[in-house]
Every structure is written in C-alpha cells, then in structure tokens.
C-alpha cells in the first residue's frame, strides 16, 4: 500500500509504479520461497532478524539487499506487514573480497595453503568413498633466492606470477594449483590415472618450465624439484601433505630439477634427519666433532703446500657420520654458524702449531670452508676470523677462506665489502667448486679473490676429449691473467695428474695424494717430506 521514495534511488522504480505489484515480483526467483516464508513468519518483534536476498533493479540487474519484516496488523495506524530493505551490495562485495583474500594468494591469485589443504581434505574423503586415485604434488623452484638477490624482489615476484600461469596452463581445470608460500607451489590431482597420474603431471610441469622466462630484461632458466604423494589406503590429509613435502626435499637433495614419488623409506630418512639435528646440537656442545685435513700439493714435486680443514663426527653410538649427512643439516638449521666458528678456531690453532714447528721457508697454510649462511649475517665472518686469529695467535697469511660462487650472488655490495675487510686482515680468499655455479668472469675481477679451485667434474672429464682439456687450460690461463692460483680438486689417477701438469696447473688435491688425515697423520706426512739435514751442518 505504501513505498518510500528511496526505492527509486535503490531499484530505479518510481513509488507509484510498484504500488500495484506483489513484493515477490521484485525478488530473485531463487530467493522467493525464502522471503515468502519470512513474511509469513513475521512478528511484531522481528527487528533483530535480518534476511538477505536479491532484489530486481528496474534495468534488469540484481541488487543484494538485507531486510527485516514486522507484522503490524494489530497496529491501527498500519494494519499490515512492514518490510524494510537496504542495499548491502558494497558490503557483500567487500565480504567476498575478504573471503577471497583469506583463501587466495595476493601475488598470483592462486588458492593459498588454507584453501589447498581444505580441498585436499575433501578430495581424500571422496577418494576413500569411491576408490579413486589421488595425487598431491609439491613444486619448489630451485635456487629462487638467487633471482631475488641478483635482480631484486620485484623480479622475483614477476617470476612467481609467470610460473603460476604456466602451472595453471599445464594442468586440468579440475586440478587445483596453489601457492603455499615463498617459491613453493602445490597441485592437487584428483582421479589420477593414466595420462593424468602424478608422475605425468610432474613431467608436464618440468616441460612447462623449460622455456626461458623474460624477467627484468633477462632470460632466466628455471627448474623445479617436485615431490609426489599418492593416496595409499588409509592416507590422511596430513599424511598426504607431509609425504609430498618429504618427496620434494628428497628430489632437491638428489640434484634438483627432478621429481620423486614418496616412499616409506623417506619417512625413515626424515626421522633420522630429525635425530641428527638434535644429536648435532649435543655434539657441538660436548666436543664430539674433530677436524681432519686433506693436503693440497705442488703438482710438480708433490710437496704439501697447505691443507683443507674438514669436519668429522664420530658419534658414540651411531659411529662415523659422513659430512654429507650432517653438513646439510647444519646449513638448514643455522648450526653451520656455530660449527663454522669452531672449525675456524681449531684450524687456526693447528696452523699456529705448524707455524712454530716447521721451517719458515716451508710454511703450510690451512684452508677453511665458509658457508653462504655465515655471510647472510653481515660482519659475522669477519668477527669469527678475527676471534680465531686472536685466540690462536696464527699468522693471517696462513689462513685461506674457501667460499662458493653462490656467496657472490648475495648482496654483492655487502659481500664485496666483507671480503675486502677479510683481505685487509691478511687472510687469502678462494672460490671453491668453480664451474658448478655461475662462473661469471666478472665476479673474479670484481671481488678480491686469490685462488680458484676447479671442481672435480673438470678433472673427471679430462679423459673425455680435447674440449675438456681446453676448458681446463682456459681456466689456468685465466688464473695467470688475474694473478690467481688455480687448484684442481678431486685428482684420483696418474693420468689426471699427467694431464693437469701438461696444462700447467700447479696445485692439486685429491685421493691420489692423500685422503683426509687427522693432525698426527698430516704431521707424519709433513715429516716424511721434510728434507734431511746433513750431519756435518749440525756439527758446524
């Protein structure tokens, strides 16, 4: 019988135009039954009850509204039902936006971890009911941090967006692609069988990433480590996610750029890693670790010039634990900072003892590996080196610090400053495993490097053809041009030694000369190489 004039602003109708209409004519067909029920149940005190529905605009669109109704038939001034509505479209859009933000990644627009886990939970339930296949894939970009460090975070974000697009393109519309955070993505594959099995999807992902990415005027090659978990009988959501994560880390540890499907032995390996992490903390506290030394020799006369300090761990119950088992754990947990400081001190003390016991004309330097993790905290390495030299009293020139090329890809200004400070202290700097990373000649010119250690792969391939020999020769000539000493790692055979000598490489290291030895073993080796003095010289 009556409509307020505000209806024209809200729905586009003049008040007079709707007086002869049924209220239900203004309601979306899907909402009419609910509104009719609401009107039938209206009472005089229904002001606290708000119902949401869609009202038809005069132009044909639908407006989200919220209404309250009052039965005022007993009120003599009304004698009817009063329906009050208000436009809540902006609020609904905001709620939808907040809901989307809560369950989607703001950078890529993909579902986030919360939504992905919820979809996996429902998929696991469906797979159990219907006996269908199910696969969860964890996709982790290899060496993504290098992009952020070298090109900036804006370039890293652009790369993540492009990767998200390619993942979406190489999967089915029924699959769920999510970004879990950082450079880690996940894919849910329901009814996985045949060409849509987890392994096949992983292969499509690898293929999708093969084409270079155009980022910040650079062409980047991107690879990923992928872990695959399949829905075994009784597998829970948590187990699926955990298994995919373990398989991904297994793929990464086996060389990156590959896929691995979860196996129960991976869980056992993860348990061992957890145990080793706890035991390593205790070992550092209780002094269980020791240092062995592997000689670096003059290839012309095989005299020992220096030694590389290598951490060793003899567990009282588990026996000898290989460095390849505990060093990665130290890197991941940050224990490498404490371990690195300890090795520095031990190596410097040993260098001091050799300095006092050896002839001045035959000094033996000690080379110590420094982790990229240690350089992430500016000033840490400089402080550790200064403390080790101060405590040991060793001559700084007898200490060589070995760093990998990845260190140079961090904050280059800060790293360059820190390396210069180390060189000012008097220690020498070496690039370790040269040829396995970026191997950009500009880095060697830009940073104060004294030595370059060619990776063992250079030496292994010497017998494969002239091309490999030419590569080694070019590195040796590069060292001469830049006044850097070139060291060949991993020499194990006489033919390798002969080839390197012929290529004018002057220093080498490897099992051909000696395995890592303890302090006494190195002492005996040095004594055996010491020139015998003439008794007549002593009498004189």
Image (tube, rainbow, N blue to C red):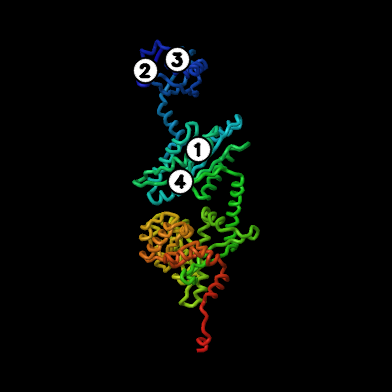
Residue nearest the viewer, comparing 200 with 132: 200
Q: Which residue is mark 1?
A: 201
As measured in the structure, the alpha-carbon distance from the residue carrying label 4 to the one carrying label 1 is 15 Å
**Residue at screen point 40% across, 46% down:** 156
**Crowding at mark 1 (Cα within 10 Å: few <14, some 14-19, many 20+):** many
Residue 58 is tagged as: 2
Q: Is residue 15 left or right of residue 400?
A: left
| Residue 229: quarter of image | top right
Residue nearest the viewer, comparing 126 with 477: 477
Q: Residue furthest bottom?
A: 540
**Image location of residue 298, percent across then percent down:** 47, 70
Q: What SS does tag 4 mark?
A: loop
Residue nearest the viewer, comparing 322 with 10: 322
As measured in the structure, the alpha-carbon distance from the residue carrying label 1 to the one carrying label 3 is 51 Å
Mark before the other along the chain sequence, 1 or 2: 2
Say if 142 sits above or below 53 in the image.
below
């Amino acid at each position: 019988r009556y409509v307020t004039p505000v209806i024209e602003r809200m729905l586009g109708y003049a008040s007079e135009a709707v007086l002869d209409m049924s209220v239900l004519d203004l309601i979306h067909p899907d909402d009419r039954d609910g509104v009719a029920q609401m009107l039938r149940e209206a009472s005089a005190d229904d002001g606290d009850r708000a119902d949401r529905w869609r009202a038809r605009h005069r132009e044909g669109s639908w407006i989200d509204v919220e209404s309250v109704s009052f039965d005022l038939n007993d009120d003599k001034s009304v004698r009817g039902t009063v329906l009050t509505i208000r436009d809540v479209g902006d609020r609904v859009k905001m709620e939808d936006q907040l809901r989307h933000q809560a369950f989607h990644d703001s950078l890529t627009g993909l579902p986030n971890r919360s939504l992905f886990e919820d979809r996996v939970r429902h998929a696991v339930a469906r797979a159990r009911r219907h006996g269908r296949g199910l696969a969860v894939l964890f996709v982790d970009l290899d060496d993504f941090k290098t992009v952020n460090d070298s090109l900036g975070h804006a370039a890293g974000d652009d790369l993540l967006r492009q990767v998200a697009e390619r993942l979406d393109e190489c999967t089915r519309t029924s699959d769920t692609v999510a970004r879990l955070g950082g450079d880690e993505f996940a894919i849910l594959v329901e009814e996985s069988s045949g060409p849509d099995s987890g392994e096949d999807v992983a292969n499509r992902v690898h293929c999708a990433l093969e084409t270079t990415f155009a980022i910040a005027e650079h062409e980047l090659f991107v690879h990923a480590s992928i872990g695959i978990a399949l829905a075994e009988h009784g597998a829970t959501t948590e187990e699926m996610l955990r298994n995919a994560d373990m398989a991904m880390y297994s793929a990464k540890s086996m060389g990156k750029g590959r896929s691995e499907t979860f196996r129960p032995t991976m869980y056992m390996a993860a348990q061992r890693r957890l145990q080793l992490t706890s035991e390593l903390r205790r070992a550092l506290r209780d002094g269980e670790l020791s240092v062995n030394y592997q000689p670096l020799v003059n290839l012309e006369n095989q005299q020992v010039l220096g030694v590389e300090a290598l951490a060793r761990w003899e567990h009282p119950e588990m026996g000898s634990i290989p460095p390849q088992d505990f060093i990665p754990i130290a890197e991941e947990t940050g224990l490498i900072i404490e371990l690195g400081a300890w090795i520095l001190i031990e190596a410097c003390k040993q260098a001091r003892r050799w300095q006092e016991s050896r002839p001045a004309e035959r000094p033996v330097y000690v080379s110590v590996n420094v982790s990229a993790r240690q350089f992430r905290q500016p000033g840490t390495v400089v402080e550790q080196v200064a403390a080790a030299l101060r405590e040991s009293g060793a001559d700084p020139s007898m200490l060589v610090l070995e760093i990998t090329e990845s260190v140079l890809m961090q904050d280059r200004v800060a790293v360059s400053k820190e390396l210069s400070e180390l060189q000012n202290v008097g220690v020498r700097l070496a690039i370790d495993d040269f040829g396995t990373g970026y191997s950009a000649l500009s880095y060697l010119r830009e940073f104060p490097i004294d030595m370059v250690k060619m990776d063992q792969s250079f030496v292994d391939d010497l017998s494969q053809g002239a091309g490999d020999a030419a590569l080694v020769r070019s590195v040796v000539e590069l060292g001469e041009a830049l006044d850097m000493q070139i060291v060949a790692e991993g020499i194990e055979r006489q033919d390798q030694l002969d080839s390197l000598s012929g290529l004018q490489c002057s220093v080498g290291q490897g099992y051909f000369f000696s395995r890592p030895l303890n302090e006494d073993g190195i002492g005996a080796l040095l004594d055996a190489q010491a020139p015998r003095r003439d008794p007549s010289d002593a009498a004189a």
